[in-house]
Amino acid sequence: MGRVGDAGPPEIGVIGRERELARIRRLLDPEDADRSPLLLVIGEPGSGKSTLLDAAAREAGRRGLRVLRCQGHEGETELVFAGLHQLLAPMSAEIRELPGPQRDALLRAFGLNQAEPAGAAGEPERLLINLAVLTLLSDTAYRRPLLVIADDAQWLDACSLDALTFAARRLAGEPVSVLAATRTDPVPEQFGAEFPRLPVSPLTEAAADRLLDVQPFPPAGPLRRQILRQAAGNPLALVELARATADSSASLSDTAVERLPLTARLERIFADRLARLPEGTRRALLFAAAADDPDLPAALLASSAAGPDGGIEAWLLAEQAGLVTLDSGRVAFRHPLMRSAVYQAASFAARREVHLALAEALAGNPDRRAWHLAAAALAPDEAIAAALEATADRARRRGGYRVAAAALERAARLSPDPQRQARRLLAACDLAMHAGRPLWVEQLTAGVVAATDDPELLTEAALWTGWALAATTRQKAALSHLLPLAASTVDTAPAVALSAVRHAAIVVYTMGDEDYRREALELLARIPADVGESSDDAWPRAALDPFGDRPGHLRLLERAVTLPGLGANALNEIGACAWVLDETATAVRLYGDSLEHLRRATTAGSNATLGQALAIAQFENGAWDAAEVTADDARRVAAENGLDMAGRSATYVSAALLAQRGDTGRARELIDRAVAGIDPTESRALQARALAVKGAIATVEGDHALAYELLRCLFTADPDPVPLHYHASHYGLGDLAAAAVRARQEKDAARVLDSVERRLAGRMSTRLTLLTHRARALLAPAGEAEEHFRAALADPAGEQWPFERAQARLEYAEWLRRRRRTGEARTALAQALAVFERLGARPWVARTTAELRACGVTMPVRKKRARPVDLTAQQLQIVRLAASGLTNREIGGRLLLSPRTVGFHLYQAFPKLGVTTRAQLRDALNDAELD
């Protein structure tokens, strides 16, 4: 939720509650024949029930409804009719207009009429009060539709609840809606089974991420992951924990966020019941709170051994209090924040005692024992630090990089010797890098600087700082670390200089700045060829000058690929080398192997930098469905770990896929998001890709002049055009030429092509050869085009890029058909169509199909790749009528619905069908799989 009570800034809307809001809108629609007049919102404390009620009130105001509200208070539960008095206080004038007996009974209930009732006291008076409420709501709604909101209904007095539910049962068909919210345990008995319930579940991980993103100081890295884990989808907890840790340096560390601080507000919500429990039960709960899941059996034994009141009776009391659940000998807290509340409510002395007891109980598990000893440590202790270092080594061998880095960081904090502390922190940097945590790496290097003045250790820390800065989009700051470091060590420590240039190479590639590229190349030339591992210089040489010594680059790549025992990081770097050299199939294989290394390590998780690189290679290699999944995963992991550039790059892949598949609206939204707020001079590679996507969008939409204008920006407007980016710009040449033909800009495009061919003569990859020949064929006089089409398609290695090869085949076929060589055209068109259909490139399928028909081919009706769509029967009926061209009013006339109800159903159906306008409905229905 964007706002929970007063937990968040008021301008933020509701996040992650689309289903609940749709249900509430249905409640507010008096024309909905199936609606119940009362809807009960139920959820745990902090789940955002009040926010939904606030949103309902705002929506009701926009619709012109009058809103009446009341809220239960724990201290007023026994005050008869307190809730009803609060609800009806704004209606004093309307109350005076009620029939006499009802008016008097209601006023007596509020203490505003001292006259005795005419009949006997008791139920008849209560019935008059309830009837008065029913009459009042019905009469008021006759003049203006009405929404009644009752928040915290679990604390409303019973008499008010009786009156409210009595009226709700009799308001069917009236323009009155009653929206109540209550906690799940217990639900007031007045809300019987006849009233529909709207459970407010925990936010999804994606919605929780969005809620953290809109906080004043969004958490990142390990802190973000821990907040997501500890809040478990509770919106109030997400907001409060983000607020409580906004100024915490723990935002970068895994070990520092194991126990997040609870705000006073969260403590009140989750720990009120704790204080009422016996001491033995609280101690037993502390054992469970201090133990991780694998340690719970030991915690149960240790709790029982700690005292006679720590056995089964203690756990039964905790379960009865609603703090834990017991199942087959296992204990689980009902909410992660309850566990935190138990742990933080205890003194350090009590926590230390429990951790020491757990360490003793876990003597046979050195890893878990080391962590509990560390939690109990009062001061630096080398023995515990050494035990944690051994734990880190075991985790590293299993591929658990995050766990290993966390153990080493904790070991460093417990190290009495500053030099040993610095070395452990540097070892943790390497592991945190493998886990894809640049913000954590940056914090670890700061610890090194604080711990030592050893030049060798500080140099290594500077290398890691440069990597972290680069991974978090601070490109110039990264190069200000890395290039001077390389320059200062190139003669005295060339291995350090090579490492610095390797780290700098990805930054230089991303920026595309020629001055930095020249500086890095000059430094690389000064480093002896035999420095470092045999694969260390393959990536920087290819990344900094991909069109330079191509045969030499390929030899280095071939040698690196055959090296035995390559780890995930080496595979990633060699894969990047293959990709930049247009050995795309090799890149996909190497990236895939690297990702498999990470997946085999149960605690390593995905790596966003690797994921976005693999997604780009899969897209270019024609594995579009796989690229879509990989890019989505990379975006998620990048957001969790502060990898801004990786997230933007993954977003580019998603946008490119959508553009070529014809979903131009979503493609435009994503590519705009990918480049939003970024300095173009620090991200020329991304800018070039964004221009290519925007050009594709314009092409699909038929705006060829705009497409040419966008794609032309890939090169400067100089008499001798140079690329915006020294590598990425060249891959737009084919589309640039195609747009030029349709925009009648052939001469200008030919000038760009001449410049590229002159600069890269003899140094092009198979892929770039394909693209330049495609461009030349489109721009050449008719008599010269065929030789270039044939050259574009001649090399079988071009199958690595099936989409680009299919584009060339289609354009060649169009050229052939115009020369009445329809037999040859049909063959090329059939080959192109098979590729476009496999990729789901709908605009290209349509264009190729039209060409086949022009060649005299009768095209069979092909079964489309259906998307399952969950529409209700009424939604489907309305959508089909709207697709046929009827207006909302005409549809309503046929189905006996109001135009507003028709609009509401279309509003729900549009996102399910993936459309934004009525004009798209016919195609969406054809593409959809409807149950």
Image: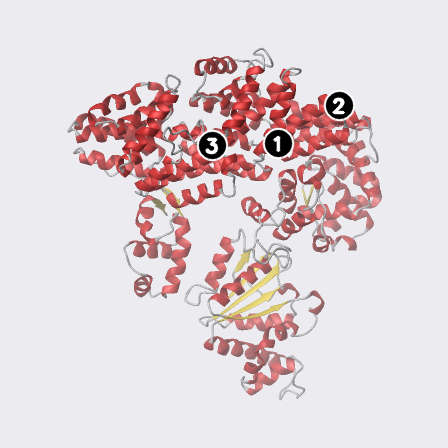
Instruction: Please give the residue where the numbered disc 2 appears in the rendered image.
Output: 454
Where's residue 883, x and y in %?
A: 30, 53
Using the image, tell me which numbered label, if any, was put on residue 685: 3
Q: Which residue is mark 1?
A: 468
The amino acid sitting under disc 3 is Ala
Amino acid found under the numbered disc labelled 1 = Ala
Q: Quadrant of residue 519?
A: top right
Q: Could you tell me which residue is drawn at 37 percent across and 20 percent down?
A: 766
Discs 1, 3 touching: Cβ within 8 Å = no
- Within-10-Å neighbours for mark 2: few <14, some 14–19, many 20+: few
Above-or-below relation of 119 to 670: below
Instruction: Single out the residue that lies furthest toward the top.
Output: 530
| Camera-side residue of 620 and 112 | 620
Q: Is residue 209 above or below residue 51?
A: above
Total count of labels = 3
- The mark nearer the N terminus, 1 or 3, is 1
> Is residue 922 at all visible to an observer of this figure?
yes
Does 907 sit left or right of 448 as displayed? left
Q: How is the image coloured?
A: secondary structure
Q: Nearer the viewer, mark 1 or mark 3?
A: 3
The crowding category of the residue bearing disc 3, from other C-alpha atoms within 10 Å (few below 14, some 14 to 19, many at least 20), is many
Whether residue 603 is visible, yes or no, is no
Q: Is residue 419 left or right of residue 829?
A: right
